[in-house]
Amino acid sequence: RFLEYSTSECHFFNGTERVRFLDRYFHNQEESVRFDSDVGEFRAVTELGRPVAESWNSQKDYVEQKRGQVDNY
C-alpha cells in the first residue's frame, strides 16, 4: 500500500505585495517533488521525485500554467 497526495500553499509577504505559491507532492508522507513560484519550475525533493520533476518541466504549457497560479491569489 502507498499514499499519494498533494498540497497547495500560498505565503503572503508584506500584506499581499508579494505572494509565494507552493504545490507540494507527497508519496508515503514524504515530499518527493514541488513547484515553487519563486523558482518557476518543478524541483525534486527526493530521488523518487527526480523523474517526475524532469517530466513535468519538459511540458512547457504545464509549467506556464503553474507559474500563472500565483496570480490567482
Image (tube, rainbow, N blue to C red):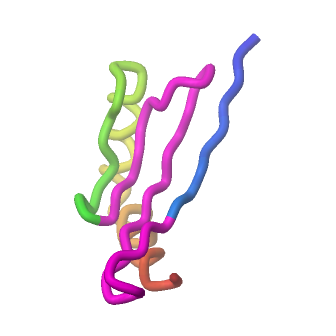
**Residue at the extreme right:** 1
Q: Is residue 17 above or below residue 7?
A: below
Residue 2 horizontal/vertical position (percent): 71, 16
Asked if the magenta segment contains residue 22, the reply would be: yes
Is residue 67 or residue 60 the one in the foreground?
67
Q: Is residue 11 above or below residue 7?
A: below
Seen in the image, is 67 located left or right of residue 24? left
Residue at 60% over, 24% down: 29
Residue 6, quarter of the rendered image: top right
In the picture, which quadrant includes the N terminus? top right
Q: Quadrant of residue 68?
A: bottom left
Look at 34% across and 57% down and name the residue there.
36
Secondary structure mostly seen in the magenta stretch = strand
Spot the residue most to the left: 39
What residue is at 27 percent from the left and 62 percent from the top? 40
So how many labels did they put on this image?
0
- Residue 37, position as x, y percentages in the image: 33, 65
Q: Which residues are magenta?
A: 10-37
- The residue most toward the top is 1
Residue 9 position within the rendered picture, expressed as x and y whole percent measured from the top left: 52, 60
- Residue 12 x/y as whole percent: 41, 75
* Residue 65 versus residue 26 in the image, above or below: below
